[in-house]
Structure formats: C-alpha cells, structure tokens
Image (cartoon, grey):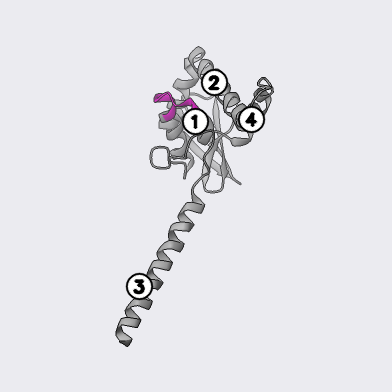
C-alpha cells in the first residue's frame, strides 16, 4: 500500500511541476496585438539579426500588419493608432483601435510600395548588417549603404524596429 501512495504522490508532484512549467511558458509569450499572436517560430526576435531577418520576411510575405503588431516599436505604433482612432467616433474602443490599426497598416503598405528602395535596403540590412549593441539599442550598418542605419530596441527578450531614419 505504501508503494502505491508513493507512486501517486510522485505522479501528483510531476503533474504539478509540468503545469507550473506550462504556466511559465504562457507568461513569457508576447501578448496578442491587434488580432495577431506573436509567432516566434516564423519571426524570431531574440537577436538584432533575427529581428531584422523577421522584418524582411514579413515584408516579403506582405505581412505589414504583423510587422506593425509585433516587430515594430509598440510605442510608435500605439501613438499612431491613438491618433487615427479619433477618426472613428462611433463604436467600442477596441473596434476603433482595430480600424485605426488597419488604417496604419494600409498607409504603411502604401509607403513601402511608393518607395521600394526602402524595402530593398531593409532586405540588404537583413543579409549584410553588422550590429552594434549598447544598453538595449542595436544599430545596424551596411558598408554598401553608408547613408543609412537601422535602429532596433530591446524590450524584454525581443528586439523591435524603431522608426528612426538615418
């Protein structure tokens, strides 16, 4: 009988540890933004190089909405969403935010379409950039594009594109 009690106790302990571990993983996952879950498998952001590759991949796949939701600096995106939501006086707050985000995504898509050199340069940065990190900021440079730099900011354990042009 005591062997059965030990087995049940051990099994209960293992189940509790597994549940606790699963909860820790859920806590670490980035929150859903504008209807998009973070996809750390397709679009990793653990290093500046990974983040830049994810940005280029999102542009290649025409996922500007995902780029804005999870790869760009949330403060910048939220600022513009708050500005645009005033254009939608009716409806619930969450609906206004989604409409404003959709407008920002469409305008950003048009911006990239009207200046394809920016997209080309971002792809070049994804392939060739050398990154210098200092206190949560990474600056990417490419020898063949001396007039431009890409700036990324670390928040938590992920890197995000900043809207600084140089």
* SS assignment at label 3: helix
Position of residue 51 measured from the top left corner of the image (x, y, whole percent): 47, 37
**Dot 3 surroundings within 10 Å: few (below 14), some, or many (20 or more)?**
few
**Dot 1 surroundings within 10 Å: few (below 14), some, or many (20 or more)?**
many
* SS assignment at label 4: loop
Say whether disc 4 or disc 3 marks the residue closer to the N-terminus. 3
Of tags 3 and 2, the one toward the viewer is 3
Q: Which residue is mark 1?
A: 67
- The Cα–Cα distance between marks 1 and 3, rounded to whole angstroms, is 43 Å
* Residue in the foreground of this view, choosing between 143 and 27: 27
Residue 92, disc = 4
Q: Which residue is mark 3?
A: 11
Say whether disc 2 or disc 1 marks the residue closer to the N-terminus. 1
Q: Are marks 2 and 1 in contact (CB under 8 Å)?
A: yes
Q: Residue at x 43, y 67 (%)?
A: 16
Say whether disc 1 or disc 3 marks the residue closer to the N-terminus. 3
Q: Is residue 60 magenta?
A: yes
């Amino acid at each position: 009988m005591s062997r059965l009690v030990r087995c049940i106790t051990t099994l209960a302990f293992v189940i509790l540890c597994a549940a606790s571990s699963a909860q820790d993983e859920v806590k670490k996952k980035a929150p859903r933004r504008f209807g998009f879950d973070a996809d750390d498998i397709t679009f990793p952001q653990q290093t500046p190089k990974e983040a830049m590759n994810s940005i280029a991949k999102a542009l290649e796949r025409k996922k500007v909405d995902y780029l804005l939701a999870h790869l760009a600096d949330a403060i910048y995106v939220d600022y513009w969403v708050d500005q645009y939501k005033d254009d939608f006086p009716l409806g619930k707050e969450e609906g206004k935010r989604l409409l404003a985000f959709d407008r920002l995504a469409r305008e950003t898509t048009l911006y990239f379409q009207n200046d394809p050199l920016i997209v080309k340069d971002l792809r070049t940065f994804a392939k060739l950039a050398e990154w210098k990190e200092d206190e949560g900021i990474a600056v990417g440079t490419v020898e063949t594009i001396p007039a431009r730099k890409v700036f990324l900011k670390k928040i938590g354990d992920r890197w995000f594109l900043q809207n600084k042009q140089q």
